[in-house]
Amino acid sequence: MFKLLLIEDDATLFNEIKERLTGWSYDVYGITDYNSVMKEFSVVKPDLVLIDIQLPKFDGFHWCRMIRSHSNVPILFLSSRDHPSDMVMSMQLGADDFIQKPFHFDVLIAKIQATLRRVYNYNTEQVTLKTWCGATVDYEKNTVSNNAGTVELTKNETFILKKLIEQKNKIVSREDLIKSLWEDERFVSDNTLTVNVNRLRKRLEELGLGRFIETKIGQGYIAIEEANGYD
C-alpha cells in the first residue's frame, strides 16, 4: 500500500479526498501541526505528496522547497489558483505535476497512478547505470557524475534524461516524451515539459553537460553524444 501525505488545510476537502483515495487502497496521512510539517513528513515517509498552495504559516511553495531539499519523493500540487506563473513556479521548485481545483476525481487518480508507476517501476530494470558523454548516470539514485562532481536530479529529470539517452543522437519528439512521462498527454500542458527539460539542462550545466541536450524547434529534444571519446 502506497503512503500519501495530503497537505491540505480545508478539513472538508481533506476528508473527501482521503475517503476517495482510501477507497483506492492508498494510505492517506494529513498534517496535524503546520509548525511541524517537515517533522511529520519525516515520520510518515510518504511515497507521494499532495500539497495545496495556500496554507497556514507558509505556502505550499515553501514546503515544496523544503521537501525537495531532503527528498526526491514525487510532489503533486492541488490548487484553485490558475495563473500560469503558479504552475511554472511549482515545476521550477521540483514538483512533478500541478492539478487545478476543482478537479474531476478520475483525473486525480490517473495522475497519482501514472506518477507512482513512473517513479517506482521504471528503475527496476536491470540497467541502472549508464555512461554518457564521459559521465555516469545512475537511474536508481537519480544522479549524474563526472570529474566536475555529482548533481542530483528529480525523478522526472532522470526519466527525461533516460529517455533521451536511450535514443542518443536521435530526436525524441515532445509528444513521445509527454506520453512516456505522464502516460496520458490529455492531462499535461506542453509548458510543463519545457520547464522540466530546462531544469534538467540547468543541472547538467553544473557538470559542463548542458550543451549536450539540444532543443530542436518544432520537433523535440536530442541527447548528443560525440563519437570522439564518448561512445
Image: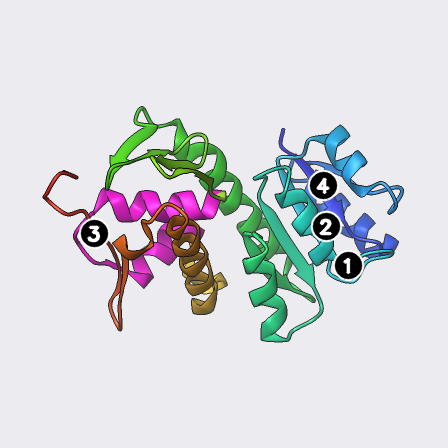
The disc placed on residue 5 is: 4
- Among numbered discs 2 and 3, the one appearing first in the sequence: 2
189 or 54: which is nearer to us?
A: 54
Structural distance between the alpha carbons of marks 2 and 3: 36 Å
Q: Position of residue 128 (x, y in %)?
A: 34, 28
206 or 14: which is nearer to us?
A: 206
Q: Residue at x 28, y 32 (%)?
A: 130
Q: Position of residue 175 (x, y in %)?
A: 32, 62
Structural distance between the alpha carbons of marks 3 and 1: 39 Å
Structural distance between the alpha carbons of marks 3 and 4: 39 Å
Q: Position of residue 187 (x, y in %)?
A: 49, 62
The residue stretch that appears in magenta: 155-183
* Disc 4 packing (10 Å; few <14; some 14–19; many ≥20): many
Circle 3 residue: 224
Structural distance between the alpha carbons of marks 1 and 2: 7 Å
Structural distance between the alpha carbons of marks 4 and 2: 12 Å
Q: Residue furthest bottom?
A: 83
Q: Is residue 111 above or below residue 82?
A: above
Labels 1 and 2 touching (C-beta < 8 A): yes
Q: Residue at x 67, y 43 (%)?
A: 67
Mark 3, mark 1: which one is toward the viewer?
3
The disc placed on residue 59 is: 1
Q: Position of residue 159 (x, y in %)?
A: 39, 44
Circle 2 residue: 63
* Image quadrant assignment for residue 27: top right
